Image: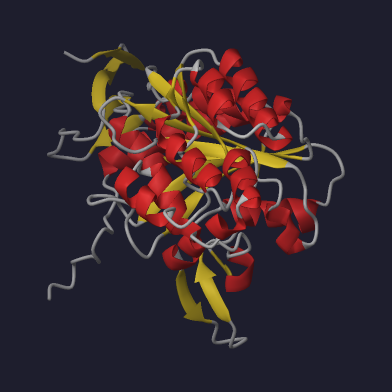
Amino acid sequence: MSTWLLPENIADVLPSEARKIEELRRRLLDRFRSYGYELVMPPMLEYLESLLMSGTTDLDLRTFKLVDQLSGRTLGLRADITPQVSRIDAHLLNRQGVTRLCYAGVVLHTRPRGLHATREQIQVGAEIYGHAGLEADLEIQQLMLDSLHLTGLTKVRLDLAHAGVLAALLELEPAAASLGESLYDALASKDVPRLHELIAHLGQVPREVLRALPSLYGDASVLTIARGHLPNLPVIARALDDLAFLAGQVEGAEVTIDLADLRGYAYHSGVMFSAYVDGVPNAVARGGRYDDVGLAYGRARPATGFSLDLREIARISPVDARGTAILAPWKHDEPLCAAISALRDAGEVVIQALPGHDDLDEFAADRVLVERAGKWTVEPRG
């Protein structure tokens, strides 16, 4: 085997892609900061039980595991940064009021999400802790859409769902809870035959309600239909009211309701949302409320947030990150060196052409530094 080959679904990021990723990363983190979010940088490696605090089977299967040679304990390479940020909020910052945090870092997955997906993603996200009201959900939802627009993805569809709907149904029919993630997968993929097979042994009312969920998809009018199909329970009524409120506040995106989209159900406790763009089958960003995540750290706090894979966003973003530059000659000349330093201090990219080379693959050198009457000046490049 060639020593330069990489593992399956792991790839180098070459200059053109890296430049675009970095440009978008800076844009997003600057926008998060403009909303008041503070940047945190959790470690890549943690004790496994800390990383798996959400208790989801999916997260466990996606996490690389290894043994720490210092302690003998099992470590994990993070597959999701959200649990780490929850730990930071719960036990390192330990604030009582509202805390806004953001992050950007690599996560590793044991298996790719899709046929051509990478197992090494760059996860970027933002979280609000300490406020249980819909105001926090609305802020995160708007920040996600704002972030996607900032990357050039202007035509976005926002899907809204709510974990409380299924939670209420499972409480009504405990036998359905034993179906576990098979039920969630069948609902999320709208695999109706599989769904009918799974729920065949349930009582008539929960069976009819679960069968109805995949069809409760469409614009906000679906919520009116849902009220006629779903049990008249306070939890369900409140969930539908929350979705109606948030759907009515969205600006800059088409809104759909999908009461069967329960991916991440075990993780979330309230409103969930996903962003889609044309030509991409999977969601480009996901978020929602997860008030119970901090329980594993002994300090549950209201929380809501979103995240996206920056490598995927860079792949589909129309943003042109190929920077312009000034081409300067290579010469031992003090005034030339001073001119180059001044330009670089001012934020310009100045590339000195090494003797015999003037080709620039990654930068568009649209200007040149030339000497005129003993002074170095910048002129358009012919």
Residue 11 placement, left or right of 74: left
Residue 342 placement, left or right of 306: left
Q: Nearer the viewer, residue 282 or 174?
A: 174
Name the spot of residue 158 as percent of width and height, x first. Answer: 46, 25
Tally the marks: 0
Q: Is residue 136 visible?
A: yes
Q: Quadrant of residue 73?
A: bottom right
Task: Please tell me which residue is depicted at 39% across the width and 36% down the height of the picture.
Answer: 283
Position of the N terminus, as image quadrant, is bottom left
Residue 301 placement, left or right of 326: right
Name the spot of residue 67 as percent of width and height, x first. Answer: 51, 83
Position of the C terminus, as image quadrant, is top left
Q: Nearer the viewer, residue 20 or 370?
A: 20
What's the coloring here?
Answer: secondary structure
Task: Please tell me which residue is depicted at 58% across the width and 65% down the height of the picture.
Answer: 52
**364 up-or-down from 126: above or below:** above
Residue 86 placement, left or right of 124: right
Q: Is residue 79 visible?
A: no
Task: Please tell me which residue is depicted at 58% across the width and 88% down the height of the picture.
Answer: 72
Name the spot of residue 372 as percent of width and height, x first. Answer: 29, 12
Name the spot of residue 362 as percent of width and height, x first. Answer: 24, 34
**209 up-or-down from 66: above or below:** above
Task: Please tell me which residue is depicted at 56% across the width and 24% down the height of the picture.
Answer: 228
Q: Identify the residue at the far front of this view.
A: 204
**66 up-or-down from 183: above or below:** below
Q: Nearer the viewer, residue 153 or 330?
A: 153
